[in-house]
Image: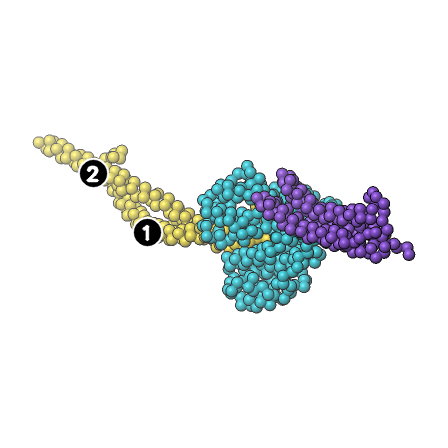
Amino acid sequence: MRLNVNPNRMELMKLKNRLAMARRGHKLLKDKLDALVQDFIKVVRENRTLRRDIEAEIIKAFEAQNKASLMLSEEDKELVTTLTQQKIVLHVTTRHITGVKVPHFDVHLEGNPYSYSLVTTPAELDEALSSFFQVLPLMIKLAEAEKAIELLAVEIQKTRRRVNSLEYVLIPNLEETIKYINLKLDELARSSVTRIMRIKR
Amino acid sequence: MIIDGLTIAYLGSALAIGLAGIGSAIGVGIAGEAGAGVLTEDPGKFGTVLILQALPGTQGIYGLLSGFYVMIKLGLLGGSPVTVSVLQGVQILFACLPVAIVCWFSAIAQGKTAAASIGMIARRPEETGKAIILPAMVETYAILSLLATILLLNTIKLG
Amino acid sequence: MTTIQEKPVATQNTAYAYLVGRIRMLERGVLNGRILESALKVEDVEQVVRIISELPYLSEALQNIPKAPAPLDDALMSHFWETLKEVGRQKLGKNLSLFFQYSFDFNDIKLIIKRHLAKKASGREYPGTFDWKKVSHFVSGETGEHLSDVYRRAIEETLAVYESTHHVQIVELVLDRVYLQEVMNMAEISESPVIKNWLIAFFMFTFFRSAFRAKYQESKFELYRTIYFKNPYLSLEDLSDIITGPDEKIGEVLVHSGMKNILLGEGEYRNDPYYLAEIEKNMDNYLMRFIRPYRTLTFGPEPVFGFLYAKSIDIKNLRILLHGKYFGIGENELRNKLRECYYE
């Protein structure tokens, strides 16, 4: 689509500058997009292996929990869960991946996780608890990776939209307008030449 | 002499009735307790439990029988009392001892067996026949003692 | 070395005839190996319930209960509790059911104290010999409430110790100690040498178990010793050897107390929860084999006590079966976990 401008040399100069700028921006954004996609693929790959590991761990933990609950009455279950003294400390910082801010979690478990009776609970409960405490930091790590993927995806989408709008809208429009102004100017030049020729005659 | 033959014969009769009665009472009591336990859970078993509980009661009857036999022999139940020498009195006393002692102990033993059998019919109602035979075996010795007492009493000839 | 390895002589007390007679009827509701085996074969919880409903008493307990693990478990627990109460109502049965009732009571007290410390509003109540409201009031400071001396002292001590250490596990350790003290007292006054030795075996097993668990949990020994009290059967040194010593040392301690083959079989000790679970099963099975020969007796407290223990193991087995089927755990794994039955 042609831009709505006056076809004169002044505008032509302006438009040419804008076109050069748009081309440069387009190139830069395209580079950024490539870098983002590369990072994205890397993070997704990491996430996939992490996820597989965690899923295996979680399945193990739930199996251990099921086995423990074979031996626990309803009252025992309430006893085990009513009062615990382990604290989970979560530190949140941010880091940058290709200019994108993503959160980073540091998790610490403090205190003794075993706060139930040594006598009335089954040994399987220890296994269930310790496997869940192994899974928890991994799950937080997974959450971090998933969030990074989400943020990267949003950024990629945004950048791609910009690249596309430059590539398919702004640059063609500018080119068309410049072509139009050139034509107009040429026509003006030609009509003035004919006018001068007429006057000379 | 203060103790005459008749008194000693009374003692024999009393022992036969008394000891056998005590034994039966204990035996029936034990079986009854076990029976009550079973009936608390299942009153429908009253018939079989009653039979088993009654089994140790027979010893008391044997004792009573022997005691009466002595009384009849002494002519205390109708007829004229016979004279009994001290020696004959002691003989009657000893003749009464088998039924007195055997029935005393066998009734208790039978009571315990009956209690065990009541436990058995509680768990296995289909085995009632066997459960009744087991305590009934103890009865044999009570009957034998009764037989011995009667035979012994028969050998004593009172004037 | 303790006396529990010897075969004690039963009392043959005819005063128990009534109770034993009743137990004979109730025993028809005890699980046996055949029923367990067929329950293992089926697919889901509903079919398991159908199979165990063959048994009298159990079928009544499970009538009209939703076929999910939690309500079934509650129904079984209250069934066991009712049985205990029935036996405990008799003069002679009182001391026999007390042992089992204590485990309920102490769990209840623990829960009440924990709820109090966690500042939770009181939730549902579980079976116990006392009035929950009274105990809750007592725990929250109204010392005027009437409570039996054992519980009163136990609660006061627990709260005091928690106040000074602020360690949650100590609540459990102190109450477990009081419970074990009661078990030992029961063993001391038991008229039957069989039950006495059984209780001592239970008592020693419990201490060993707690020590194995403390070793796995890497508890501090200072914390663990809260559960210990001086007794003639196990010394604190033996337990500290188990907790702080190397794995090989455990074999020695067990040989010394005559328990090696009972607990470990032929194997060596491994510090692994699933291995500990295996040991726990061995303990239950040993206690069952210990009391089982006395089930044929007609007189004396032994068959009554044996029945109650059988019932408690039944509850365990049923829980394993019902939850196991619910979670879809394999047949062989479940069979591995099941305890031995009173009747084969």
- C260 and A133: which one is in front? C260
Residue A29 shows in the view: yes
Q: Earlier in the sequence, mark 1 or mark 2?
A: 1
Residue A125 shows in the view: no
| Label number found at residue A179 | 2
**Which chain: cyan?**
C
Disc 2 residue type?
Lys
Question: On the rendered structure, is C342 left or right of A51?
Answer: right
Q: Residue furthest front?
A: B159
Residue A191: percent from left, percent from top: 15, 33
Tint applied to chain B in the drawing: purple
Q: Chain of mark 2?
A: A
Which residue is at a point 85% across and 56% down the rendered structure image? B86
* Residue at the disc numbered 1: A38
Residue B98: percent from left, percent from top: 74, 54
Report helix, strand or loop for mark 1. Answer: helix
- B118 and C131: which one is in front? B118
Residue B147: percent from left, percent from top: 71, 51
- Is C139 located above or below residue C280 in the figure? above
Question: On the rendered structure, is C269 left or right of B104?
Answer: left
Residue A100: percent from left, percent from top: 39, 49
Which residue is at a point 56% across and 56% down the rendered structure image? C285
Question: On the rendered structure, is C176 left or right of A2?
Answer: right
Tint applied to chain A in the drawing: yellow
How many numbered marks, from 0 up?
2
The answer to whether mark 1 and mark 2 are in CB contact below 8 A is no
- A169 and C156: which one is in front? C156
Q: Residue furthest left?
A: A201
- C221 and C181: which one is in front? C181
Q: Residues within 10 Å of mark 1 (few under 14, many from 20)?
A: few
